[in-house]
Image (spheres, grey):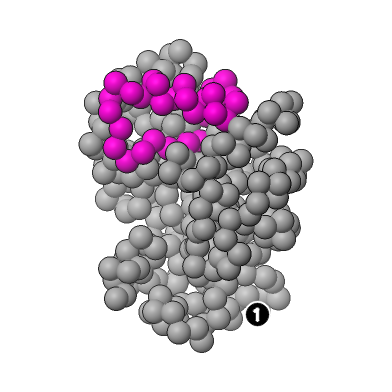
Amino acid sequence: MNSKLILGTVQFGLKYGINNTIGKPKKEEVLSLLKVAYSSGIRILDTAEAYGNAHQLIGNYHKEQNNFKFKIITKFPHQIKHNLIKTKVLEYLDIMNVNTLDVIMFHSFDSFKSNYNSLKTLNELKSEGLIKNIGVSVYTNTQLKNLLKEDLVSVLQLPFNLLDNFSVRGDLINKLKEKGKIIHTRSAFLQGLFFKKTTDDLPIVKALRKPLNILNQIKKKQNCSMEELALSYCINQKNIDNVIIGVDSMSQLNANLKASSYEFDDEVLNCINSIAVENLDLLNPSLWNKTLY
């Protein structure tokens, strides 16, 4: 199942995630991580200009490994001048040492709306072969519904995990697939929240303690790791095309590669699907400060 994984690169350029205790990996470790990821079957990287020096690190890897290049998904800044779009795309291609971008994404639905007029230019860049797909990163079901009718948007990136689960997203994911959209999901580990002890004093852990306890009970009963439970839940959704993972060490990468082959039965699947978090804002890390403090 490794071919269904996308390696996220935000950790390469920024200290990211509530469970990150080591910060950014060094350049040499990033290059090693990329080599192991490619040799293990991962073929797509998810990155962004906003992710520190992630673009440059990918370019360094591609210069060293010219015959083993990744497909690239990257994102514009939230605000970009219309007349600079082609310049930006050419800059990204040059820095990352690739001939085409598999997906160019808007960082958010708001960014998509404020830059809506750029769709024509992006479609022209598709005709030139500089990009293959146009995508939008979203957070809410309302945003997904609005994008159902956008024919030029072929890729959607959305949260999906053990709590932000099929009961929250399933119907819309099915409708998006009927429209021929490519579905990429992120936040498989909810920024590392699933690895926190349920006795932790973090406000978000306290707020989600009950469903987190349920997940730990399932994990214990299945005699599996949380990586296996969380990642396999996402990977085995038939209408999810790819699952983004983020790592900041070789041990994390190896754990995720191992977890991607884990399988569980329908009883466990139904149990996870039945978990319902009433306050959906608690499932959006960008709202944690606003919601909890």
Q: How many marks?
A: 1
Which residue occupies 45% across, 67% down? 163
Between 277 and 7, the one nearer to me in the picture: 7
**Residue 1 vertical placement versus 56 (above, below):** below
Evaluate whether residue 162 shows in this view.
no
Which residue corresponds to the image point at 32% horizontal and 69% vertical from the top-left? 289
Relative depth, front residue between 127 and 90: 90
Q: Amino acid at mark 1?
A: Lys
Q: Residue at the bottom extreme?
A: 199
Asked if residue 96 is positioned above or below residue 201 in the image, the reply reads above
x and y percentages locating residue 192 in the rendered image = 53, 66
**Residue 284 rendering spot, x and y as whole percentages:** 37, 62
Q: Assess disc 1: are there few (<14), some (14-19) or many (≥20) residues with their C-alpha within 10 Å of its C-alpha.
A: few
Residue 99 inside the magenta-drawn segment = yes
Q: Residue furthest top?
A: 128
Q: Which residues are magenta?
A: 73-102
Q: Residue at x 26, y 44 (%)?
A: 110
Q: Position of residue 44 (x, y in %)?
A: 60, 38
Is 266 positioned to the left or the right of 87 in the image?
A: right
The residue at the point 28 percent across, 25 percent down is 82
Residue 113 seen in the figure: yes
Residue 200 rendering spot, x and y as whole percentages: 50, 83
Per the image, the residue denoted by label 1 is 220
- Would you identify the image quadrant in which residue 34 lies? top right
Residue 109 located left or right of residue 265: left
Q: Is residue 200 left or right of residue 123?
A: right
Q: Is residue 108 magenta?
A: no
Q: Secondary structure at mark 1?
A: helix
Picture layout, residue 30 above or below residue 271:
above
Res 195 quadrant in image: bottom right
Q: Quadrant of residue 218?
A: bottom right
